[in-house]
Image: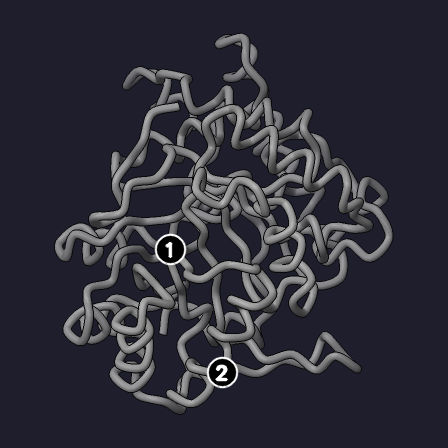
Amino acid sequence: MESRKLGDLEVSAQGLGCMGMSEFYGQGDDTESIATIHRAIDLGVTFLDTADMYGIGANEKLVGQALKDRRDQVVLATKFGFVRDPDDPNVRGVRGDAAYVREAVDKSLARLGVDHIDLYYQHRVDPNVPIEETVGAMAELVQAGKVRHLGLSEAGAETIRRAHAVHPITALQTEWSLWSRDIEDAIAPTCRELGIGIVAYSPLGRGFLTGRFTSTDSFGEGDFRVVGQPRFSEENLAKNQAIVEALKAVAAERGVTPGQLALAWVQHRGQDVVPIPGTKRIKYLEENVAAAALALTADDLAAIEAAVPLDAVAGARYPEARMGSIGK
């Protein structure tokens, strides 16, 4: 697989999101997940993404286990900032104070079983702590050798500027897909002005753009899409089926799956964009990786965007309460 640059950090053109291996998308299997991580590395995927909140630490432990004998083959990214209650995981807050930054990184390093993290993100901006304090503490981690590069997740344009003035920000992680394009107005231009790479999470619309989900009955028990994602309500899911059907028609002409077409569209946003589709199964991993080599013409891109118009998506990205932390 070709490589791309996030700032001055070189990674594979497509990464692997590991979140769903431990939580949110139904029951996982650690053995299968580790095999999927190993297969990804074998296929040239060198960029792995996790966070301390996924499975309340379980996902970092899983990724660390998978990398025991392969640490030098990957660029490892994790995140801090969300604070969850183990007794009620749905209760969560955000912390970005300096003391918490120092505490969180040491816990992540221990769970991952590594001596440094290649890319360390603030998962969400803490509205009660100046970004200068948070990034200042993160910069100290770079000086201490615990972290190599810094990132932000779902931050707004002005916050990105303020953070970058404290210490170079290597990457912004944000949702970007055919049905989530908010970034294109101000955030992506700001990142490009400052030389910050963009890591696109949920590039397949949380799996919806693959065409595998036609009703809420399509999801397994405990899948957070049905419980807490407005776009996956029964009403909105039915409305959004038109998007997938149109995408399927374009994909059929190219002889690829709708998921591959949607992922290739994200890959074509620019050489500074690295999507991190998540999966816990080798079958879907291999399908995703194949999309990294899919070349799209200007006509292809126009047909894809005509199939999924900007105003066609029914439902918000997150529930209203959680949208408050986006783009701040």
Q: Quadrant of the C terminus?
A: bottom left
- Helix or strand or loop: what does disc 2 sit on? helix
Residue pictured at 79% horizontal, 82% vertical: 87
> How many other residues sit within 10 Å of disc 1, few (<14), some (14-19) or many (≥20)?
some
Disc ID at residue 118: 1
In the rendered image, residue 229, in percent from the top left (x then y), is placed at 66, 59
Report whether 57 appears left or right of 27.
left
Q: Quadrant of the N terminus?
A: top left
In the image, is residue 269 above or below residue 163? above
Q: What's the colour scheme?
A: one colour
Comparing 273 with 308, the one in front is 273
Disc ID at residue 243: none
- Helix or strand or loop: what does disc 1 sit on? strand
In the image, is residue 105 above or below residue 32? below
Q: Which residue is mark 2?
A: 103
Closer to the chain start, of discs 1 and 2, is 2
> How many other residues sit within 10 Å of disc 2, few (<14), some (14-19) or many (≥20)?
few
Q: CA distance from mark 1 to mark 2?
A: 17 Å
Residue pictured at 23% horizontal, 73% vertical: 163
Comparing 188 with 79, the one in front is 79
Q: Amino acid at mark 1?
A: Asp
Q: How many callouts does the rendering have?
A: 2
In the image, is residue 141 above or below residue 198? below
In the image, is residue 52 above or below residue 61? below
In the rendered image, residue 295, in percent from the top left (x then y), is placed at 36, 16
Q: Amino acid at mark 2?
A: Glu
Identify the image quadrant of residue 3: top left
Residue pictured at 68% horizontal, 41% vertical: 34
Residue pictured at 45% horizontal, 46% vertical: 311
Identify the image quadrant of residue 265: top left
In the rendered image, residue 324, in percent from the top left (x then y), is placed at 48, 76
